[in-house]
Amino acid sequence: MNETTTTNRVLRMDSMPLRRASYTDEGYLMDRPVVTSTGVFQYPGPGGTVRRELRLPEEVFGPESLESYKGKPIVLTHDAGLIRRDNVSDHAIGVILSAGIPSGENVRAEIVIHDTGELEKSALRELSLGYELELDETPGVYMGQRYDAIQRNIQIGRASCRER
């Protein structure tokens, strides 16, 4: 039996709380938050439906995926859109300092937010990753949870702060 797997490149955003942040003597916010994890994530679909996508450990912890965190900008909200070198200075408030760091089923990363004034004015308390991936439209069940597709070749593009 021949099976054909359909994949397409898509953008996704996931959010995780900032909890253990501390400030440097210069007033910069430093943290090593959980930025993503493995498992089945839910995303809104058309007409109020829910789409479930699997993030396998071998994809989330893949060397290229983990390396893709390092040096990516942190922006204030998703409203900034795609961040590129020609607009990063208009939107960036900080940076992801490290590659992704495996931590159990999670990935952590060292971050610094330089423009803490903007962060404090906005009362934003979550870090949201924007990333590209190839979506493998093969459905199945993972650890008892149904999923509609598998996220593959995950590459981090930026992080943004948002409300909890």
Image (tube, rainbow, N blue to C red):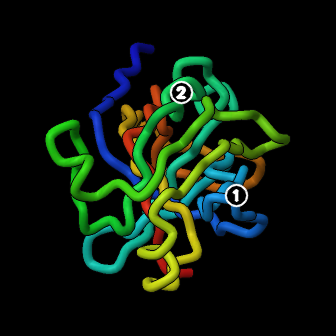
Q: Nearer the viewer, mark 2 or mark 1?
A: 1
The number of numbered discs placed on residues in the rendered structure image is: 2
Q: Which residue is mark 1?
A: 24
Residue 117 in the image: state x and y as whole percent: 47, 75
Residue 78 in the image: state x and y as whole percent: 32, 65
Q: Is residue 11 left or right of residue 26?
A: left
Residue 146 in the image: state x and y as whole percent: 61, 55
Q: Amino acid at mark 2?
A: Ser
| Quadrant of the rendering where the C terminus is positioned | bottom right
Residue 16 in the image: state x and y as whole percent: 62, 63
Q: Is residue 49 left or right of residue 123?
A: left
The residue that appears at 62% across and 53% down in the rendered structure is 40
As drawn, 7 above or below 36: above
Instruction: For label 1, count other residues whose C-alpha is less than 10 Å away and answer few (under 14), some (14-19) or many (20+).
Output: few
Instruction: For label 2, count other residues whose C-alpha is less than 10 Å away and answer few (under 14), some (14-19) or many (20+).
Output: many
- Residue 58 is drawn in which quadrant? top right
Label 2 vs label 1: CA separation?
Answer: 29 Å
Q: Among all residues in the image, which is located at the extreme top?
A: 2
The residue that appears at 40% across and 45% down in the rendered structure is 73
Query: Which element type, helix, strand or loop, lies under badge 2?
Result: helix
Q: Nearer the viewer, residue 28 or 56?
A: 28
The residue that appears at 26% across and 78% down in the rendered structure is 47
Q: Which residue is mark 2?
A: 65
Query: Which element type, helix, strand or loop, lies under badge 1?
Result: loop
Q: Amino acid at mark 1?
A: Thr
Decide which of tag 2 and tag 1 comes sooner along the chain.
Answer: 1
As drawn, 95 above or below 121: above
